[in-house]
Amino acid sequence: MLFELLLASAVVCLAYNIYKYMVRKTLDLQGPRSLPIIGNIHSFIQDGGPVWQVQIWAKEYGDAFKISILGEEIVILSDYDSIYEALVERSNDFAGRPYENSYAINKWFSHGIFTQDFTQGFRAYKKLGLRGLKQHGDGISRIVNISKENISNTVKEFKEENGQPFQPHDKLQNLLCRIIICVLLGENTPYKEDDGEFARKWLEDLEENLRGPFFYLIEMFPWTRYFGNPVYSTLNEMIKSRNKTFTEWIERFKHYKQESGERTLIKELLAAKEDGKMTDDGIFGIMTDTFIAGIFTTRTTTSGFLLAMMNFPDIQSKLHEEIDCVIGKEQLPELSDREKMPYMEATILETLRYMSMVPTILHKTTCDTHIAGCDLPKNTQVWMNLYGMHHDKRYFKHNPDSFDPTRFLDSDGHLVPHEERKAVLAFGAGRRVCMGEVLAKTRVFLLLTQLLQNFYFEQADPENPVLFDMRKFIAGPDTLIAPKFKIVAKPR
Ligand code: HEM
């Protein structure tokens, strides 16, 4: 009986997709040929996932083109003018998040900020999240203090490797996990070894499961979960273990909060719940967003930077010179050193551009609107191809596929004016801009500067060098994740 019911619901879903295909109105844009009903999905499963396929299409069909997925037409933008217009100039029109089919899986995970559509609820959550992260005024000093203490531990761990090859992956992840737990729970709430183990296992499972055919199958046909899709059962287990750990974190926070007047993200969320403005799902959702985005993104960025150091010793030497001149060998880096270190700023900017670790951002129109000369009905998915824009000759004239921080420096070694680097939108912009941009930039600067102050980074095996090649990164649905690699950190 159960099987018949499941089969019947699968048939209804399929019939709905066929109906959507039959009644679809087509957008006035060109794009790759698509198959009936499934559209272009099959192209996503091959050749490393959607990111690289989108680049191939963008070269063929231009700055604005359309693809089709299960009867739904999706617009893909790749040029700065249209992306800026959609993200910033007419931000409200394009601030929706697609939910149906794509992102469905994230939605089960998180009722937080990232996956929410552009509703009143979203706006209230984002405001709360931003307030809880406190990335301005004395909030920045707090982030700096938390970061500095933890970074010094990581430097010590790197030193303990005695110049022998090791994988920096877990050490970086532990560091970022400690910082995020501090940001969430406050400085007085102790970190436990189990926290790092939970993060390691949980994020590894996430990386493993948010890609591959079973993932795309469940994204497109959520009902395949009833037919034993293995991704679904793993994700269910992950949700259970997340709920258990987050509940324990909240209890731990409640236990220690008396000792501190510090404002933390959890404190904001619990206060909002008391005022009836937040649900338990919302709290777990915002914690999940902060946990995932706060670790994955920065781990990938710092790993990418280390790969650049191993591959471009000249760039590393220039950074060493700048650090020695501005900070010296004894002082710890301060955030105020940033403005005196244009070469470091340019190298971080180049890392964000070159990697484009969030290569495509997925938005949806919130009303009938238009872009690139094309009328778009409400609820049209619009994907911004940040990777394509970041590797476009029109905005990055000197070989955009090469890693070259000097593209952001003038002849006197100063950072070029904002106008000349405006096409780097690694954190997005407008209504859906990254919630942790300031936190991320602060941590990345302090961490990388302190690492370079202490070490020369070299290839672990010069005969078989690990290249800084984005095609070797793991392509998830909306992020590129650095692979694990070995490095040598020679004390300076
Ligand atoms: C190098 C590090 C990071 C990069 C490159 C990055 C990049 C991005 C990008 C491109 C978006 C999507 C914008 C859009 O959809 O238009 C985003 C969204 C978001 N990021 Fe980050 N991020 C980073 C670090 C962080 C950190 C540290 C946190 C939190 C602690 C964070 C939290 C979020 C959240 C909650 C959103 C969703 C915002 C919304 O939907 O309105 N991110 N990020």
Image (cartoon, helix red, strand yellow):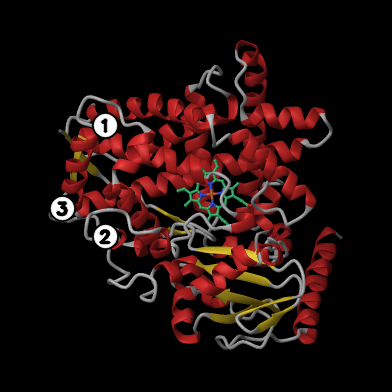
Query: Counting residues from the N terminus, which is met first, the one under dot 2 or under dot 1?
Result: 1
Amino acid found under the numbered disc labelled 2: Asp
Is label 1 in a helix, a strand or a loop? Answer: helix
Separation of residues labelled 3 and 2 (CA atoms): 18 Å
Earlier residue among tags 1 and 3? 1
* Residue 101 horizontal/vertical position (percent): 69, 65
Q: Is residue 423 left or right of residue 477?
A: left
The amino acid on which the numbered mark 1 sits, given as a three-letter code, is Phe
For the N terminus, the quadrant is bottom right
Picture coordinates of residue 416, whole percent (x, y): 33, 59
State left or right for residue 91 relative to residue 65: right
Q: Residue 333's x, y, as percent?
A: 31, 31
Q: Which residue is mark 3?
A: 314
How many C-alpha atoms fall within 10 Å of the one at disc 2: few (<14), some, or many (≥20)? few
Depth check: give the residue in front, 20 or 388. Answer: 388
Q: Above or below — where is 468 with respect to 457?
A: below
Q: Label 1: which residue? A: 158
Question: What residue occupies the far left of the structure in this picture?
Answer: 463
Q: Pointer 2: what residue?
A: 410
